[in-house]
Amino acid sequence: MKYLLKLDLDDRFNYNTLMNTLTSLVVMYRLLRIKAERFRIYISSSKKGYHLEILISSPRELSDIEVILLQAILGDDPRRCIHNYYRILKNKPYNVLFNVKNNKKRIYDKKLSRLLLELYNIMINFSEKIYKKKKKELYEALESQS
């Protein structure tokens, strides 16, 4: 089964946040066999807002509550998690990330998205040499965003 996890990382989008997210995903893979298949980072045109979408595959069906729990574990905005939980309880659509806010569009960052997937796959199959190189590339790519 495939699911799209949506994380709002606006105020916490940095190297440490992304490494914590990747490490949590590796633990999910090792314990639960939930595997990330694709990452997509979207940056607002003002460069102040960030959304991370992660396509995952799970060996079993996940409930809506489990999906928002996984998002919370991976660093989603806590207030957004509470709103998603409320929406589920009220049988309303949940897991909404806005593409446009105040007439500002979000921009897909292909390079960072690719780096996250590469680093994640290296972490799952652990290769120390390649891992250090990709971590450095991710850090440098994030620094160039500032």
Image (cartoon, rainbow, N blue to C red):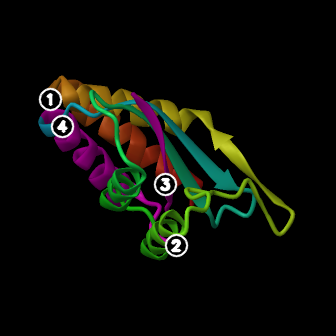
Relative horizontal placement of residue 29, taking residue 1 as reference (left or right): left
Alpha-carbon neighbours of circle 4 within 10 Å: few (<14), some, or many (≥20)? few
Q: Amino acid at mark 1?
A: Glu
Q: Measure the alpha-carbon separation of dots 3 and 2.
A: 32 Å
Please identify, in this view, whether the residue under mark 4 or under mark 3 is nearer the observer: 4
Q: In which image quadrant can residue 94 be found? A: bottom right
Classify mark 4: helix, strand or loop: helix
Q: Amino acid at mark 3?
A: Glu
Question: What mark, if any, has residue 143 been given in the picture?
Answer: 3
Image height of 62 relative to 13, above or below: above
Q: Are marks 1 and 2 in contact (CB under 8 Å)?
A: no
Classify mark 3: helix, strand or loop: helix
User: Going from the N terminus, do you reach mark 4 or mark 1 first?
Assistant: 4
Q: Amino acid at mark 4?
A: Leu
Give percent across and percent down for residue 45.
75, 57
User: Going from the N terminus, do you reach mark 4 or mark 3 first?
Assistant: 4
User: Going from the N terminus, do you reach mark 3 or mark 2 first?
Assistant: 2
Give percent across and percent down for residue 4.
49, 40
Q: Residue at x 66, y 41 (%)?
A: 108
Q: Which residues are magenta?
A: 1-30
Relative horizontal placement of residue 9, taking residue 145 as reference (left or right): left
Classify mark 2: helix, strand or loop: helix
Q: In which image quadrant can residue 69 be found? A: bottom left
Q: Measure the alpha-carbon separation of dots 3 and 1.
A: 23 Å
Question: What mark, if any, has residue 32 been given in the picture?
Answer: 4
* Residue corresponding to mark 1: 128
Please identify, in this view, whether the residue under mark 3 or under mark 2 is nearer the observer: 2
* Residue corresponding to mark 2: 83
Is residue 42 in the magenta section? no
How many numbered marks does the figure carry?
4
Q: Measure the alpha-carbon separation of dots 4 and 3.
A: 33 Å
Image height of 62 relative to 134, above or below: below
